[in-house]
Image (tube, coloured by chain):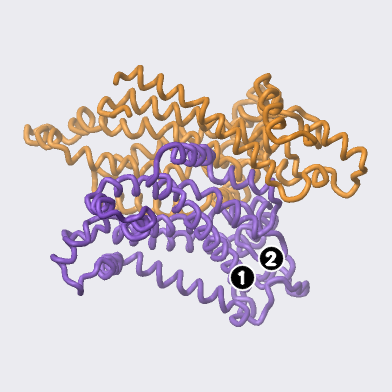
Chain colours: A orange, B purple
Amino acid sequence: MGIWTYFLRRLVQVPLVIFFVSIIVFALMKVTPGDPVSIMLGPYATPETTATLKAKFNLDRSLPEQYLLWVGNLLQGDLGASIRSQEPVTDMVLNRFPVSISIALMATLLSLLIAIPAGVLAAYRRNSLWDYALMGFSTIGLSVPTFTLALVLILFFALKLQWVPIAGVGLRTLSDGFWPFVLPYIIPVVGLAVTTIAELARIVRASMLEVLDQEYIRVARAQGLGNLVILRVHALKNVFIPIITVIAIIFAFQVGNTITIEYLFSIPGVGSALINAVISRDFPVIQGLTLVVGIFFIGMNLLADILYAVVDPRIHYN
Amino acid sequence: MTVNKSPTQSPSEEGVELGSSHSPLRLAAGQFLRHRLAVVGVVLIALLSLSAVFAPYLTPYEPTKLNLQAKLSPPTWEFPLGTDHFGRDVLTRMLHGARISLLVGLGVVIIAAGIGTPLGVISGFFGGVLDNTIMRLMDALLTFPPLLLAVAIMGTLGPDTQNVILSVGLVYIPVFARLARGNTLSLRESTYVSASVALGAPNWRIIVLDVLPNIIGVIVVLVAVTFSKAVILEASLSFLGLGVQPPTASWGRDLNEARRYIEDAWWLAAFPTFMIAASVLNMNFIGDGLRDALDPRANK
């Protein structure tokens, strides 16, 4: 099977996965214990407001009808509106998704910039002090939740040293000057990146070790080529294959992980909107945001698969 | 390590070669004990569990009782880890927080393994439309990042400790289902399952006697990994204010409240952070040791 047939078959699966994700998001809102309308309205509900709200959300219809009406609106770009602020969820997504994405993208870039050289060096100097230090850091970095790391960074760099502000992401634009715009991003992005640096450095080290163990590297060595030449010309090329394929996954992971960071730094992204919606039990917002994030992740998975097929010709399409 | 204690090896071969004193379990235990960090992990987590169980008897304080005269006291002989803004002893709250973390971890693996494993085995064993429906649903669940899905589920269930267990458990069901299905699929091709089929054994008998004993190893490894992830997720949810509700002691929740005093009362943030990191680290060590001992593909 050729690569194009593989892409086509992979693409055809996407609507099916989106269908199942939409079923799950829909079901999520239907398993709420108790009556969602009375939860949303709180103790001040009157029979009239309850009835209006029920009609507004089609809760007076059968489940399949509700699902179809919901999907019908989705297809027209209507994700519903917040019960609290009346703000359309579509607007919320359009305003907030770019913020989350930009932070996740920066954290991904930072992870790559640090983890690739660190991992390559650790494998190259296997069992050296550097190798042990990096693996130790990686083990601890994977055990500590993102928000605790961010708290430590806040304490030292924002409160003790006062190098960077705690809040301000999304409040300023580039027209306020370069540093006032950039500085607030530093702690959130670094805090977000630590976990993925830990994970990625491990992957890079493992794949580098595997490559260095290959016959062609030993042949190159036997030919008397210098270590740096071997590294640059022969080894790195093959190390990048697994890395390129995990980039999409790492980026997606960052988007999922921004949620605690957005909360901690009051960043107006999708994560903080979701938390606010959960706290105020704003069901249409929870539903809309979850669906959008789900579809985003389906896209990232697709991208990862495609990248994988493109960069690694050995892959079997099945 | 050359001795292969792979659980997927056919039982007859193992019996002939190794004899009864080298049962697979004993070999796995030996392998595990050779993993030094894993042994340290088991000892420390056992200590943590014991102190969680006996928390009420270990300190003279109660985790939720206010004592405003003693508020924000730094670590002293009287309060070894200091007190919080309500004058509650931090050590007492850490021990009671361990109860929540371990309880959530336990509940989550029971739900996730208890529902996910049978789903995966049934899916892999019978295949067809059933397999397709179950696995597409599992794939859809796996699409979401764990924390985000847990947050969304908390939104429908409402914040509460019991709901934390439910939502995080649900998040990890597909992980078990996928692993169980994959292993069942490859077992179904094995000679001894074909032999059982040829002998006319009913499906339930093959599943219980041939499939389950052979996938239990990888499931146990996943249980250890999931346990530590559940501890992190509980801490994250409680930190966000969506999990365990005050005044109940929870490491994540206490960390959230410590934010306001982070400059003046370092002990409030330091100890919950330490408890979360140390327990997750040790659980991961146990997971590594179990993987070396039980997962035949992980032998390196």
Q: Earlier in the sequence, mark 2 or mark 1?
A: 1
Which of the 4 quarters of the picture holds residue B182? top left
Work out which quarter of the rendered image holds the N terminus of chain B and state it: bottom left
Q: Which chain letter goes with mark 1?
A: B
Q: Secondary structure at mark 2?
A: loop
Q: Which residue: 48% across, 63% down?
A: B279
Badge number at residue B248: 2
Q: Is residue B249 left or right of residue A219?
A: right
What chain does mark 2 sit on?
B
The type of residue carrying mark 1 is: His
Residue B68 falls left or right of residue A254: right
| Residue B20, horizontal then vertical, whole percent | 20, 73
- Amino acid carrying mark 2 in the image: Thr
| Element on which disc 1 rests | helix
Count neighbours of disc 1 (C-alpha within 10 A) and say few if under 14, some if 14 to 19, many if 20 or more: many
* B173 sits left or right of B70 in the view: left
Tell me where residue B297 appears, x and y as whole percent. Answer: 27, 50
| Label pair 2/1, CB-CB below 8 angstroms | yes
Q: Percent from the top left, x then y, of residue A294?
A: 57, 34
- The residue indicated by pointer 1 is B96
What residue occupies the far top of the structure in this picture? A4
**Is disc 2 in the same subunit as disc 1?**
yes
| Residue at screen point 28% across, 29% down | A316
Q: Is residue A220 visible?
A: yes
